[in-house]
């Protein structure tokens, strides 16, 4: 290694040049990645059009209950908003007879009508014939029906559990892992069942972390949420609460001032969201996330690796960087499970690992989630890790760096030290 100051600077400049070169491909590709921020103007125009179809004011549009009340769930209404061929309409109806679908007008407005075949929001929300034709997979690969020791409870780990508070969501994702619960009827878990679940938590002192989800935890009424969180606050061994929700993505107007006020009274509270593509990050979803962050809530993201939507290292990098801009910390990327009707979304695990390898080192450590495969039969989240430890000798390791440099590394020998 050169020693003089000038030589060191020259060395650093050469290295900086290499680094600049190595990011060029990403920067070029990134220009082609659709984002909700870049496309906001066109999205706003589409919202005007949808509002005129529904004859609704902008104020009403921003009312989350109006959005839910006016979900699009039949092909005739859908075809007034998106250009659908007769064949497509038939396919949607047929698949819809097997698997329920519904999209709120806000989320639908993100779809570019000219790019239906590969629009990430269209693919996540409108039924395709591939769902109908999928003979593989099972409805409950996680054995959730066998991991419920009390009403509405899913317990798979020693110190934490889920309370399923509702089967409702703002919209029904085509890749949903709990689609067996999304029948024709919407329900919130009854007060009696919630009380039984709370009692189970109270009676099991090792439970220190309670996750409210379903369905979507933020589909509950403000009052019910406040009551549930208060009950959990009163159980001394419950150290923290978590909420699982997709509303900041699909229905950002649900994040009201009143909701934020309620949530801010139940610290420590963690919210995990489900963004899958940078197109979903718009000024409206940004405002929802920032409002939650301002009231002290720690936000995480749980993406699902989906073929044709985000199974590209650069798309995933962009997604995670856009998330950090709105105070959401990437937490997990889930490998898609073998749920019936979702086969067309599944990738191989190698693809997920490659995506992870193209994050580490290439971008902020904060932008790097953990890639998870859920073990069959409900045996838990299992990290799929890229290998950076090549071999381990007695006093030496061989490591592989993010750029694939193979380097020897001294391992401290304690015997010699003492
Ligand atoms: C995912 C999950 C949790 C939370 O797991 P973390 O890894 O702590 O985020 C808890 N209980 C169940 C049943 C789960 O599926």
Image: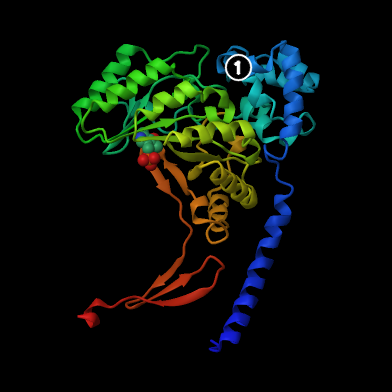
Residue placed most toward the observer, 181 or 202: 202
Q: Residue at image x 32%, y 77%?
A: 394
Residue placed most toward the observer, 28 or 175: 28
Q: Residue at image x 63%, y 18%?
A: 96
324 is higher (above) or lower (below) than 98: below
Q: Residue at image x 71%, y 40%?
A: 38
How many numbered dots are placed on residues in this image? 1
Secondary element type, mark 1: helix
Query: x, y percentage for residue 168?
Result: 49, 19
Q: Residue at image x 70%, y 51%?
A: 30
Q: Which residue is mark 1?
A: 67
Is 381 displayed left or right of 193 in the figure?
right
Q: Quadrant of ligand 1?
A: top left
382 is higher (above) or lower (below) than 201: below
Does the beta carbon at disc 1 come under 8 Å from ligand 1? no
Residue 16 seen anywhere in this rendered image of the structure: yes
Is 140 displayed left or right of 312 in the figure?
left
Residue 172 seen anywhere in this rendered image of the structure: no
Q: Residues within 10 Å of mark 1 (few under 14, many from 20)?
A: many
Query: x, y percentage for residue 77?
Result: 72, 13
On the image, which quarter does residue 309 sit in? top right
Query: x, y percentage for residue 379?
Result: 35, 40
Is 317 displayed left or right of 408 in the figure?
right
Q: How is the image coloured?
A: rainbow
23 is higher (above) or lower (below) than 262: below
Residue placed most toward the observer, 331 or 40: 40
């Amino acid at each position: 290694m050169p020693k003089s100051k000038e030589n060191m600077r020259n060395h650093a400049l050469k290295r900086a040049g290499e680094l600049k070169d190595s990011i060029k491909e990403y920067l070029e590709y990134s220009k082609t990645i659709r984002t909700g921020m870049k496309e906001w103007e066109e999205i706003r125009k589409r919202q005007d059009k949808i509002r005129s179809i529904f004859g609704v004011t902008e104020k009403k549009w921003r009312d989350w209950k109006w959005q839910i009340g006016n979900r699009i769930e039949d092909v005739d209404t859908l075809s007034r908003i998106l250009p659908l061929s007769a064949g497509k309409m038939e396919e949607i109806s047929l698949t819809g007879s097997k698997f329920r679908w519904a999209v709120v007008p806000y989320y639908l407005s993100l779809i570019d009508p000219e790019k239906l075949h590969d629009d990430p929001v269209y693919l996540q929300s409108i039924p395709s014939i591939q769902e109908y034709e999928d003979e593989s997979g099972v409805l409950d690969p996680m054995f959730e029906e066998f991991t419920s020791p009390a009403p509405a409870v899913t317990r798979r780990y020693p110190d934490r559990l889920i309370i399923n508070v509702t089967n409702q969501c703002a919209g029904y994702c085509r890749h949903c892992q709990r689609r067996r619960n999304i029948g024709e009827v919407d329900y919130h878990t009854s007060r009696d069942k919630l009380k039984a679940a709370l009692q189970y938590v109270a009676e099991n002192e090792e439970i220190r972390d309670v996750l409210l989800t379903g369905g979507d935890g933020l589909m509950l009424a403000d009052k019910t949420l406040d009551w549930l969180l208060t009950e959990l606050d009163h159980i001394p061994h419950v150290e923290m609460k978590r909420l699982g929700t997709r509303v900041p993505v699909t229905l950002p107007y649900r994040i009201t001032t009143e909701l934020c006020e309620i949530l801010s009274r139940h610290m420590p509270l963690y919210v995990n969201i489900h963004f899958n593509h940078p197109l979903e990050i718009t000024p409206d979803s940004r405002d929802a996330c920032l409002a939650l962050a301002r009231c002290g809530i720690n936000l995480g993201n749980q993406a699902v690796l989906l073929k044709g939507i985000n199974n590209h290292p650069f798309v995933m990098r962009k997604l995670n960087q856009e998330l950090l801009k709105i105070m959401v910390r990437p937490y997990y990327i889930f490998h898609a499970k073998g749920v019936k009707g979702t086969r067309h979304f599944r990738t191989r695990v190698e693809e997920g690992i490659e995506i992870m390898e193209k994050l580490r080192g290439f971008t902020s450590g904060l932008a790097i989630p953990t890639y998870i495969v859920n073990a069959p039969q409900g045996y838990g989240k299992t990290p799929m890790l890229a290998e950076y430890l090549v071999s381990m000798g007695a006093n030496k390791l061989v490591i592989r760096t993010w750029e694939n440099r193979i380097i020897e590394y001294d391992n401290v020998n304690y015997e010699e030290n003492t």
